[in-house]
Amino acid sequence: MKYLFDPVTPSVAIVAQIERFPVNRIYCVGRNYAAHAREMGGSPERESPFFFSKPSNAVTDNGAMLPFPSRTQDLHHEVELVVALSGEALANKGQELSLVEAKSAIYGYAVGIDFTRRDLQAEAKENARPWDTAKGFDNSAPVSAITPAAQAGSIESATISLLVNGELRQLGMISDLIWNIPELIAELSTYYRLRPGDLIFTGTPAGVSAVGPGDVMEGRIDNLETLKIGFSASL
């Protein structure tokens, strides 16, 4: 097979491995922590989760110093547990997964930040438009190296947090998820055929707020590699 130009395959590092994890699609879950649902003006009740996506090339390696995104005056951080998918359940099926199949499809976990152009998101909501420019822009999904599930310990009991310039902004527990990880995977598989290489951003705890040029963010989840991302000081 010949291509018109060399294809680019976005990928994420894997802890202590030379091989990298090729990214197929990035799925995100909205308002999956009760406190965050409240701060965004939503209901904390256990309604069906809703999903949106980012392009696979939105991933950015850990430690990057990024240009500040264009076309926004209100960029927000949202630290999240990222679930990386692989395994036979996806290769052989991928749709309508049971909870057991969903759990078996988990390859590993990482720390991610869902950067959001909040002003563009608010404008899109007001005009009933898609969120693409608010959520799916370049470098909007930095991800730490993936820790295989067997090495991550009890992820459900882990603490999740985010610091900006050393100041704590977000803090929560993975156990606070309204929809747990197997439930999210199973539900998502009723909308899409999930494939090896998919990433799921599972939701963010309360405390999202604005960041600007020169800020440095650290996303932390117990037993996972810390994610550290910064923005260059000038626009």
Image (cartoon, helix red, strand yellow):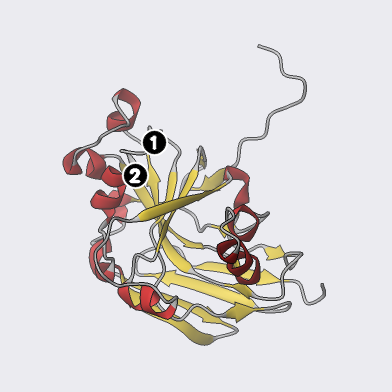
Q: Residue furthest bottom?
A: 167
107 relative position to 25: left or right? left
Asked if residue 61 can be seen in this view, the reply is yes
Q: Is residue 101 above or below residue 114?
A: above
* Disc 1 secondary structure class: loop
Question: Which amino acid type is shown beneath numbered disc 1?
Answer: Tyr
Question: Which amino acid type is shown beneath numbered disc 2?
Answer: Leu
Q: Position of residue 14 (x, y in %)?
A: 47, 48
Task: Specify the quadrant that holds the C terminus.
Answer: bottom right
Q: Which mark is residue 43?
A: none
Q: Position of residue 211 (x, y in %)?
A: 63, 78
129 relative position to 50: left or right? right
Looking at the image, do the residues carrying marks 1 and 2 touch, with CB atoms under 8 Å apart? Answer: yes
Q: Position of residue 89 (x, y in %)?
A: 27, 31
Q: Is residue 121 above or below residue 147?
A: below
Q: Position of residue 20 (x, y in %)?
A: 52, 41
Residue identifier under label 1: 192
Task: Specify the quadrant that holds the N terminus.
Answer: top right
Residue identifier under label 2: 188
Q: Is residue 190 above or below residue 142?
A: above
* Disc 2 secondary structure class: helix
Q: Residue at x 76, y 72 (%)?
A: 232
Quarter-of-image position of residue 195: top left
Nearer the observer, 190 or 68: 190
Per the model, the C-alpha gap separating discs 1 and 2 is 6 Å
Nearer the observer, 126 or 111: 126
Q: Residue furthest right?
A: 234
